[in-house]
Amino acid sequence: MGSILCLETSSRVCSVAIGCDGQILACNESEKENAHSSALTALVDRSLQQAGTGLSGIDAIAISMGPGSYTGLRIGVAHCQRVLLFP
């Protein structure tokens, strides 16, 4: 299995992790309320750096599906689209 970029935006805590072959290579989170949209890009960048890879090294993206904040879920999906369309 390849590297997976994991986004959790449905809860109060916004988190990003990168996993590969059952191992967590990087994990970063922000507990700042109502800051998912502003924190997500930095968390992804920090996680990629810690994992020693770039977006080209990511094979899949996993996004939480809730339950949780509908706005938070939209932020995760929109960020995923941005990552895929404008790397």
Image: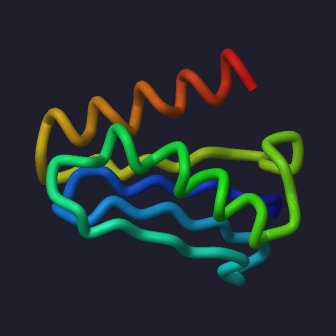
State the scheme by which the image is colored: rainbow
Residue closer to the observer: 38 or 74 = 38
Q: Quadrant of residue 83?
A: top right
Give the residue drawn at x 48%, y 31%.
Answer: 79
| Left or right, residue 53 beside residue 62 | right
Kindly give the residue lying farthest to the bottom in the view shown: 23
Residue 66 drawn above or below residue 81: below
At a point 51% along the width and 71% down the height, the residue shown is 28
Image coordinates of residue 33 in percent, x first then y, are 16, 57
Quarter of the image with the N terminus is bottom right
- The one nearer the camera, 41 or 1, is 41
Instruction: Say above or below: 40 vs 16.
Output: above
Horizontal side of residue 24 vs 56, given as left or right: left
Q: Residue at x 40, y 50 (%)?
A: 39
Q: Position of residue 65 (x, y in %)?
A: 29, 47
Residue 25 lies, with reference to residue 44, above or below; the image says: below
Using residue 58 as the reference point, say whether residue 33 is left or right of it: left
Quadrant holding the C terminus: top right
| Whether residue 49 is situated above or below residue 42 in the rendered picture | below
Q: How many marks?
A: 0
Q: Position of residue 23 (x, y in %)?
A: 71, 83
User: Who is closer to the viewer here, 59 or 16?
Assistant: 16
Q: Quadrant of residue 77?
A: top left
User: Picture quarter containing residue 29?
Assistant: bottom left
Q: How far across and how far down the image is residue 32, in percent?
A: 23, 62
Looking at this rendering, what residue extends furthest in the top direction?
85
